[in-house]
Image (spheres, rainbow, N blue to C red):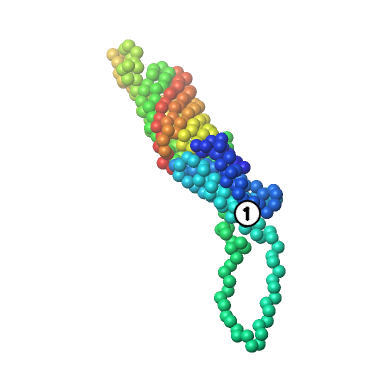
Amino acid sequence: MIERPAPCVERDAAEALFVDALKQSSAPDAGWTMRVGVRREKTALRARGELSDPSGAVVASRDFSVRGESCAPLARAIGVWASLVLDQQDAQARPAPAKEEPSKPAAAEKRVTSSPPPPDPVTAPVWPTPQHAEGPYPEQALFLRHPPDSRSLELGASTFLMNAGDSGALAGGSIFLVAELPAGVFFRPRLSYGRNFRPLQSVGEESRDLGTARVDVCLRMPGFYLDRKGLAVDICGGGEGGFLNVSGTQTREAHTLAYGAFGPGIGLRGEFANDFVAEVRAEGLMRIAEGLPVGGRAEMAIVWRAR
């Protein structure tokens, strides 16, 4: 049985490939089960087969991998492996043949020495000790959570357009880091700079520059797609602080104000190439310093997965 949707080009026919490959294998008795899990790792497919006896105990397990997007080579490999393991189990289940007493040589018969016979290929071990079973796949949970040795680290850059209350519309850019922490929490610090460029200014309005540092804590909901080709959603919350520099006019001198805000954010991520992600984000801003309390930010980003 296939434990999860197989990321193969064969799609619905993937399970039939493995069933056909296992038809040539015969179990010692009824109740034996073969479970197959398939997942994509960058440019390769990885399959894990687990053979269980009628009591449900795992007797043997094996990992196979192949480059490309077809599950047919994996199905053939698992079929051959299952046949060998089942033959070994069948041989072990048979009663051992009774040993015949060697006849005593005649006294006048010349003693002949011979080398020991080769081991019986049926009863000799044909496969290494079963490996420990892997843990659940990260994508099976509602929120993404990798093992400690494979937590992700990402670097990104973005452009944004924001409404900063009475500061008007501002446009600019950001750089950020996304680091996965224990328990599936993603830490996202960011530095941003923006200003109300002339096309965004009202008539007679002074120019304004905004610099901020923001920290978000996020949870990531993975989609059930082929690895590196799917969508995911980040649900975040955080706060930011910085400065708002206002230029002088004929009636008011230039001055700098403190800026602070907090609010939720949501991001939609789409993986379009190996280790690269396109992201669209929206954030709500409740301002706690300088001006009106409500604002918002729209952001488009390119992210590189460093790990």
- Residue 165 in the image, given as x and y percentages of width and height: 43, 18
Residue at 66% over, 52% down:
27
Q: Is residue 6 above or below residue 208?
A: below
Residue 93, position as x, y percentages in the image: 68, 59
Q: Nearer the viewer, residue 12 or 170?
A: 12
Answer left or right for 282 relative to 59.
left
The residue shown at (39%, 25%) is 160
Would you name the residue on which mark 1 appears? Answer: 86
Side of 104 relative to 297 (left or right) = right
Residue at image point 45% right, 22% down: 296
| Residue closer to the observer: 10 or 225 | 10
| Residue 238 visible (yes or no) | no
* Between 269 and 25, the one nearer to me in the picture: 25
Viewer-closest of 48 and 100: 100
What quarter of the picture does the N terminus occupy?
A: top right
Residue 159: image quadrant is top left
Q: Amino acid at mark 1?
A: Leu
Q: Quick check: 31 left or right of 167?
A: right
Residue furthest to the left: 250
How far across and how far down the image is residue 156, in percent?
A: 40, 34
Which residue: 47% across, 25% down?
Answer: 283
> Compared to 193, does 125 lie above or below?
below
Task: Provide the secondary structure element on which disc 1 rests.
Answer: helix
Crowd band around label 1 with a 10 angstrom C-alpha radius: few (<14), some (14–19), many (20+): some
